Image (cartoon, grey):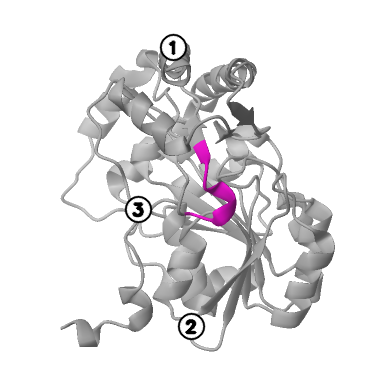
């Protein structure tokens, strides 16, 4: 049977999650805040009125209009919806990937760029970041010129490093190639910065976002904004009814009450600053600036694995980054939680590092 499986697939390792029964889960960049309790009864009533025996609106026209209204998306562009933004990344590479094509991205970055490239048997090339996780303009442009990639991914801001790449460099990349350039803005809710306005200057630039980081991770809703010439092709690869009727209804409801949903975002931003300062007080940690809802740290006085295990033993789960890229060998990523979760993390971390 394994002879039938493509070599590139056999070499892959499935996306890993860590089983966890503790009380503080800070490993997946989830928001600690979901639908506000004041809205729960309205949402439950809405969902209870939906006929789940019928297929959803395949175009999700009402939901797309809500996205346009809330995020000020011009009618000049079309919106493609996905079961999470991961599905959209897959659709993009199904369209332009495959044998003889190159996918380019800075690295370390979101691991699914390379994994999906392997699905399609495309060549994935990562351009290593410099010390401090900065992207060298000369090194990057040399790779773009040489490879002429079919697709370029920029995580904006980057995961797992938390920083931005130069938007002028992203636009210059779009000018240099015929392939599609993707600004993956999964953390737009926390960064507030976007390449959406730059799309007016580049027909091959598209923006991918998700509602997951805003407190709706279980909903699995991503959306891609692109020029019609690309959107028409993307839609050919989107599976019919990929966004379920409950998902559409819940997302539309959330967008109708977006100001209330965003109150959780403001709290996370405040906690991110408090947590960054507190983590910086540990002499064994180097804390990197973040424009997201997570903080990446380098462990210097011991090993990241010892810290990870010590926290897990105390009921706190964070993300170990070893194995993703050599630059991350002794690094950890910590999602920003609610105040009491962050307090529990800091207390456990104090015990682990003092030990």
| SS under mark 3 | loop
Q: Which residue is mark 3?
A: 243
Q: Are marks 1 and 3 in contact (CB under 8 Å)?
A: no
Q: Are marks 3 and 2 in contact (CB under 8 Å)?
A: no
31 over 225 or under it: above or below: above
Quarter of the view holding residue 175? bottom right
Q: Earlier in the sequence, mark 3 or mark 2?
A: 2
| SS under mark 1 | helix
Quarter of the view holding residue 231? bottom right
Quarter of the view holding residue 48? top left
Instruction: Give the image location of residue 324, x and y in percent.
Output: 48, 54
Q: Name the residue nearer the viewer: 173 or 5.
A: 5
Residue at image position (68%, 32%) is 289
Q: Mark 3: few, some, or many residues within 10 Å (few <14, many ≥20)?
A: many
Q: Quadrant of the N terminus?
A: bottom left
Q: Which residue is mark 1?
A: 347
Residue at image position (52%, 28%) is 258
Q: Which range is magenta?
A: 324-332
Q: Mark 2: few, some, or many residues within 10 Å (few <14, many ≥20)?
A: some
159 over 228 or under it: above or below: above
Spatial CA distance of label 1 from label 3 is: 41 Å
Q: Earlier in the sequence, mark 1 or mark 3?
A: 3
Q: Which residue is mark 2?
A: 98
Q: Is residue 310 left or right of residue 4?
A: right
Q: Of circles 2 and 1, which is in front? A: 1
Q: Is residue 173 left or right of residue 275?
A: right
Q: Of circles 1 and 3, which is in front? A: 1
Residue at image position (72%, 51%) is 195
Residue 347 in sight here: yes
Q: Are marks 2 and 1 in contact (CB under 8 Å)?
A: no
Instruction: Give the image location of residue 176, x and y in percent.
Output: 80, 75
**Magenta stretch contains residue 216:** no
């Amino acid at each position: 049977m394994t002879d039938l499986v493509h070599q590139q697939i056999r070499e892959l390792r499935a996306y890993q999650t860590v089983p966890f029964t503790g009380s503080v889960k800070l490993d997946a960049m989830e928001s600690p805040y979901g639908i506000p309790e004041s809205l729960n009864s309205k949402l439950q009533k809405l969902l209870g009125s939906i006929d789940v025996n019928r297929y959803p609106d395949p175009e999700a026209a009402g939901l797309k209009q809500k996205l346009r209204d809330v995020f000020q998306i011009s009618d000049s562009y079309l919106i493609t919806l996905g079961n999470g933004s991961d599905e959209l990344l897959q659709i993009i590479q199904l369209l332009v990937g495959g044998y003889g094509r190159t996918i380019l991205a800075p690295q370390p970055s979101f691991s699914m760029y390379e994994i999906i490239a392997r699905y399609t048997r495309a060549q994935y090339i990562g351009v290593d970041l410099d010390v401090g996780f900065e992207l060298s303009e000369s090194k990057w442009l040399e790779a773009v010129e040489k490879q002429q990639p079919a697709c370029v991914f920029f995580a904006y801001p980057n995961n797992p490093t938390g920083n931005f790449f130069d938007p002028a460099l992203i636009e210059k990349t779009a000018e240099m190639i015929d392939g599609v350039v993707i600004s993956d803005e999964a953390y737009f809710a926390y960064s507030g910065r976007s390449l959406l306005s730059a799309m007016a200057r580049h027909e091959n630039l598209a923006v991918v976002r998700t509602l997951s980081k805003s407190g709706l991770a279980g909903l699995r809703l991503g959306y891609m904004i692109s020029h019609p010439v690309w959107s028409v092709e993307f839609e050919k690869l989107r599976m019919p009814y990929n966004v379920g009727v409950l998902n559409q209804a819940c997302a539309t409801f959330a967008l109708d009450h977006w100001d209330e949903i965003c109150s959780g975002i403001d709290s996370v931003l405040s906690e991110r600053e408090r947590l960054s300062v507190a983590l910086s007080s540990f002499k064994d940690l180097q804390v990197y600036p973040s424009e997201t809802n997570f903080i990446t740290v380098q462990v210097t006085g011991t090993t990241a694995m010892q810290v990870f295990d010590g926290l897990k033993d105390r009921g706190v789960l964070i993300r170990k980054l070893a194995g993703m890229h050599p630059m991350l060998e002794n690094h950890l990523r910590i999602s920003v939680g609610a105040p009491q979760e962050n307090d529990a993390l800091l207390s456990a971390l104090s015990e682990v590092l003092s030990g």
